[in-house]
Amino acid sequence: MNKTRVLLLIFLIMALSFLAKGCSFHPKTSLMILQYYLEKAVVDGELTAEIKGAAVNDGSTRLEYAEVEGNFYSQDGTLLATGFAKTIKELVFLILDPGDVWDFTITYPSALGDVHSSLNILQWDLKKDSSAARIIVKAENNGDVMLSFAEITGTFYDAADEELDSATATTTRLGVGEVWEFSIYCPAPNFEDVDHVTVEVTEVDYELEPAQVDHATAEVGTLRGRTIMP
């Protein structure tokens, strides 16, 4: 056996050894949540709710950015709000080397904080028959807080683009990520003339009540790592 074949055989044995031990040639970027709990307290006369916990960099890369997503639920399971703990604050980054532990806090949003309330119309269709003209609508709460009130308006037009009439649909307590499906009927007596429609969100509102928070969950979000060079 010549020298080249011996070297190839040695390399093959080493490669098989790595695979047998479950080793990977790619560094592992990972964050593991060790524990978390919901804490409610009165601060300056105001009730607050926070998710506090600890996470460890259990990978083989240095984490230059990491986040944990927290979800706050009511007793009936409605998702009231979502929030994040991030390893960056005011442009200062917390670097997590392998084995480093990060103590994180996710605060239930307040009216004075950065609250994103939003209702997104996913789809709508105009349906007509001999008895009515209606718009079938599907919308989603794509914000980070429960909507205490939401209103969508449908406007009905004839073929000449003249407005025939409009109507609204409303709902309450629409949880984060929850989908709302409903119909808006044309109130005009000449509904058979409806040719096309428009649909728009006309009002959304929210109420942040920490007292409603009953339990919470936490999970790892976005991670960005860099291999540590020897």
Image: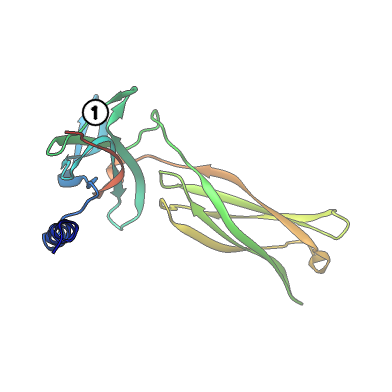
Percent position (x, y) of residue 49? 25, 38
Considering every residue shown, the one lying at the far right of the view is 160
Percent position (x, y) of residue 207? 41, 41
| Left or right of residue 17: residue 182 | right
In the rendered image of this protein, does residue 99 appear above or below residue 152? above
Q: Residue 208 or 12: which is nearer the viewer?
A: 12
Q: State how the image is colored.
A: rainbow
Q: Which residue is mark 1?
A: 94
In what quadrant of the picture does the C terminus appear?
A: top left
Q: Residue 57 or 131: which is nearer the viewer?
A: 57
In what quadrant of the picture does the N terminus appear?
A: bottom left
| Left or right of residue 56: residue 69 | right
Percent position (x, y) of residue 218? 24, 47
Percent position (x, y) of residue 30? 22, 46
Q: Is residue 70 visible?
A: no
Considering every residue shown, the one lying at the far bottom of the view is 130
Q: Is residue 87 visible?
A: yes
Q: Residue 129 or 229: which is nearer the viewer?
A: 229
In the rendered image of this protein, does residue 89 appear above or below residue 180? above
At label 1, which amino acid type do we have? Leu
Q: Secondary structure at mark 1?
A: loop
